[in-house]
Image (cartoon, rainbow, N blue to C red):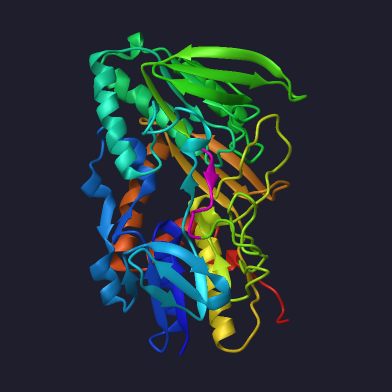
Amino acid sequence: MARVAVLGAGLGGVIMAYELRDVLGKGHEVVVVNKGSTYSFVPSNPWVAVGWRDKTAIEVDLAPVFARRDIELHPQGAARLHPAENRIDLTDGTSVSYDYCVIATGPDLAFDEIEGLGPEGFTQSICHVDHALKAKEAFDTLVRNPGPVIIGAAQGASCYGPAYEFTFVLDKALRDAKVRDRVPMTFVTAEPYIGHLGLDGVGDTKSLLESEMRQHHVKWITSARIDKVDAGQMTVSEIADDGSVKAVHSLPFRYSMILPAFRGVSAVRGIEGLTNPRGFILADRHQRNPAFGNIFSVGVCVAIPPVGKTPVPVGVPKTGFMIESMVTATAHNIGRLVEGKAPDAEATWNAVCLADFGDGGVAFVAQPQIPPRNVNWSSSGKWVHAAKIGFEKYFLHKIRQGKSEPFDERLALQALGIDKLKAVRFDEPV
């Protein structure tokens, strides 16, 4: 009997546990270690931050679902992974042993790397539902007392879609509140150009997003390094291509939401052979760690090098479809190892994204995510907003039902010309 531990119960971790249970069957153990027993649908956080959703609408209690699927849950959370000992220390002093481990922790949010950044400083966040609830309080204050707004993503960030989403969701919410005319908005991003997205653009995202910015009266600063945030004031250096400071901007604000840089969580950060200097998990083409062959990783915690050199550090995003492709490959590969065979599945790392703008949006498909690509498509329209709502309902239903891939997902992917099962590439056995 094999015992497989999944570290983390976010988008990747929960689906990982479901797929492992499907692949391994009842003859093996699946264990999940997570801080708490609640799953929260992070893509809905921009809506929470303006009051379009409440916390309970986007959360799922995992305990009964896991019990129904015979998945063991440890909600204490991890203190430290000991890969050489096949053990995870928990925060209550106990530990979990494993034969195989899948790291799916998501990121640690590096607000501390910029003075004054984050919910404990002077800017808001939508990276966690509790951050979004605090951002909603600040939004209500902004409506009562309108003033300048700064939205964006800090140097080293590797998730840009939500910054664009929130810019336009906030614009719509302010228009609905009849105060948008008193709220000048500036978008500040480490990206070298609008629509880069950490992917060197997808299709015509540069023109699409620049056009949206102009139509919604949003100014922008690219190649931006946030130096410091004080109460109501943000200092931003605009960096030239040669690395010199092109200009320094002192931007006043009454409300700001900035996505931080990511790094690996403390439970794994600094383990030689397991992580890179930022604490992200090193993985080969089979999602397997080169130093510890029984450890795999999926999702945001995986180390992926930047697409190219940029004046300000820009990370690479991991979109939902890409993460699920990692999950499918990993479950298959662990199943192979349990059977005494070699891993042979590779995730495609394609990107399929719906960026909601409140009453419209932008969608893109990148196959593969890193250029050059076979598919490089983007589009915009009101249909994206409707599609995002539909996807939210579908995905939460999937989590509540304990299903890794219900039939309706296959239909949706096939409608886009992407079959997840076919998307995972299998090499000849080694």
Residue 48 seen in the figure = no
From the top left corner, tell me how far across and down residue 360 is, in percent: 41, 31
Majority secondary structure in the magenta region: loop
From the top left corner, tell me how far across and down residue 171 is, in percent: 37, 22
Residue 249: quarter of image = top right
Q: Does residue 336 appear left or right of residue 55 in this picture?
A: right
Locate the C terminus by quadrant: bottom right
Q: Does residue 297 appear left or right of residue 129 in this picture?
A: right
Locate the N terminus by quadrant: bottom left
Q: Residue at the location (70% across, 82% down)?
A: 429
Task: Specify the farthest residue to the top.
Answer: 182
With respect to residue 21, does 383 lie above or below?
Answer: above
Residue 346 lies in magenta, yes or no? no
With respect to residue 115, does 94 lie above or below?
Answer: below
Q: Residue at the location (58% across, 75% down)?
A: 84
Task: Judge by depth and name the residue closer to the eye, 352 or 180.
Answer: 180
With respect to residue 86, does 400 lie above or below?
Answer: above
From the top left corner, tell me how far across and down residue 184 is, in percent: 41, 12
Task: Judge by depth and name the residue closer to the eye, 86 or 357.
Answer: 86
Q: Residue at the location (74% across, 25% down)?
A: 243
Residue 90 seen in the figure = yes
User: Total marks drawn?
Assistant: 0
Residue 266 lies in magenta, yes or no? yes
Q: Residue at the location (24% across, 24% down)?
A: 140
From the top left corner, tell me how far across and down residue 87 is, in percent: 48, 75
With respect to residue 99, does 221 lie above or below?
Answer: above
Magenta span of residues = 260-267
Task: Specify the farthest residue to the front.
Answer: 93
